[in-house]
Image: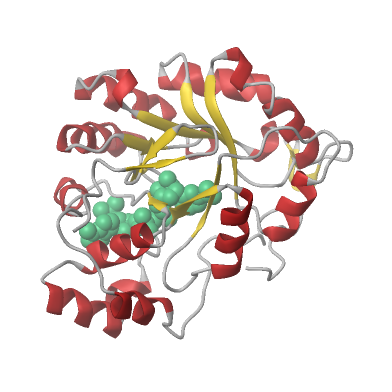
């Protein structure tokens, strides 16, 4: 039976990312400090944030409040789209807000180099390949242990991996993954290239329709688990780290009850073949298209 809460996935750098983390997108600054503290005190050792979430400061305070030593915690943060041409400024801003001198994982949040003066426009003289060329310099500085990407489909990964300036394979691709967005082709591609995938919106995000899905609910009842635990176990058993978000202490605790049980092959198959397909995070709000139906 799986022991997930202290398990890690080994990255192509040798780094070990804890299998279960706490997400913080849409966690209000006033709530996230307590949520991070509670999670760490309950045993979580992985916190996912981003410059764009506007809460790095409070995430950092929650980390301090928890009393858990910094070196025991995996911190992921992300470079925001309008900062692509200012990677140094981006990482320095995140480190300052978080109150730490390094992060464990620094991700390019989206493959879109947005114009800070006009968020509907792409920068004319920049692209994500240039951003990655800059990010590749960070591990040597010690301020970032691992670099990775997020929201990269196969087409953009191919572009990145074949660019002349490409040197470092992303350690992680953080992507939307839940039973309504299982992306098997992209997972296979990343596996072949040695890129670990972290599942975001792993519960289906705010107002998740998965919380009302008959198959999920029946399985949860039969196994004496919550629907959320079923969804997280599905992600873990596919080899992905999961970062469920909650600002509710009782849910933070429940979402971490992932040891000593598992899903059978048949249960995994059932969840992977739910008929509905949707993405919570599309690309319509970006100045360029980043998803091309290649999973
Ligand atoms: P999620 O984790 O799939 O779902 C969060 C929602 O589920 C919240 O409304 C939360 O409510 C609720 N919830 C959590 N546990 C529950 C439980 N046990 N029972 C009932 N409801 C529960 O959503 P997400 O925030 O979209 O994704 C997770 C994390 O992935 C984010 O927070 C962020 O760190 C990351 N992410 C990254 C990207 C990217 O572009 N890289 C995009 C999206 C998300 P309460 O908080 O009110 O308890």
Task: Assign the N terminus to one quadrant of the image.
Answer: bottom left
Q: Vertical placement of 72 versus 101: above or below?
A: below
Q: Vertical placement of 287 versus 106: above or below?
A: below
Looking at the image, which residue is at 55% across and 20% down? 93
Looking at the image, which residue is at 89% across and 36% down? 125
Its colouring scheme is secondary structure
Q: Foreground: 61 or 161?
A: 161
Q: Vertical placement of 133 versus 129: above or below?
A: above
Q: Position of residue 253 (x, y in %)?
A: 16, 48
Q: Position of residue 58 (x, y in %)?
A: 35, 28
Answer left or right for 291 relative to 148: right
> Would you say residue 254 is visible in this rendering?
yes
Q: Foreground: 178 or 115?
A: 178
Q: Foreground: 70 or 158?
A: 158
Looking at the image, which residue is at 80% across and 34% down? 130
Task: Assign the C terminus to one quadrant of the image.
Answer: bottom right
Q: How many marks?
A: 0
Q: Spot the residue most to the right.
A: 125
Q: Position of residue 209 (x, y in %)?
A: 36, 74
Q: Quadrant of residue 202?
A: bottom left
Q: Vertical placement of 124 versus 234: above or below?
A: above
Q: Position of residue 64 (x, y in %)?
A: 27, 19
Q: Quadrant of ligand 1?
A: bottom left
Answer left or right for 104 relative to 260: right
> Would you say residue 206 is visible in this rendering?
no
Looking at the image, which residue is at 49% across and 19% down? 95
Answer left or right for 288 relative to 245: right
Q: Foreground: 144 or 17?
A: 17
Q: Spot the residue most to the left.
A: 224
Q: Quadrant of residue 8?
A: top left
């Amino acid at each position: 039976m799986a022991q997930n809460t202290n398990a890690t996935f080994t990255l192509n750098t040798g780094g070990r990312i804890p299998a279960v983390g706490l997400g913080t997108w849409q966690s209000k600054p006033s709530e996230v400090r307590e949520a991070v503290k509670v999670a760490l005190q309950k045993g979580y050792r992985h916190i996912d944030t981003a410059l764009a979430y506007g809460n790095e400061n409070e995430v950092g305070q929650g980390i301090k409040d928890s009393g858990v030593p910094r070196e025991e915690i995996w911190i992921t943060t992300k470079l925001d789209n309008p900062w692509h041409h200012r990677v140094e400024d981006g990482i320095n801003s995140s480190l300052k807000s978080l109150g730490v001198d390094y992060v464990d994982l620094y991700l390019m949040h989206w493959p879109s180099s947005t114009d800070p003066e006009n968020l509907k426009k792409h920068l004319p003289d920049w692209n994500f390949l240039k951003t990655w060329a800059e990010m590749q310099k960070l591990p040597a500085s010690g301020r970032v242990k691992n670099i990775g990407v997020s929201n990269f489909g196969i087409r953009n990964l191919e572009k990145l991996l074949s660019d002349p300036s490409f040197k470092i394979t992303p350690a992680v691709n953080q992507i939307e993954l839940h039973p309504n967005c299982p992306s098997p082709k992209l997972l296979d591609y990343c596996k072949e290239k040695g890129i670990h995938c972290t599942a975001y919106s792993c519960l289906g995000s705010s107002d998740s329709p998965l919380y009302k899905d008959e198959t999920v609910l029946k399985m949860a009842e039969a196994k004496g688990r919550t629907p959320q635990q079923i969804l997280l176990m599905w992600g873990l058993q596919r080899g992905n780290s999961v970062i469920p978000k909650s600002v509710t202490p009782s849910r933070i605790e429940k979402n971490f009850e992932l040891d000593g049980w598992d899903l059978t092959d048949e249960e995994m198959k059932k969840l992977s073949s739910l008929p509905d397909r949707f993405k919570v995070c599309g690309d319509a709000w970006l100045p360029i298209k980043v998803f091309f139906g290649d999973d």
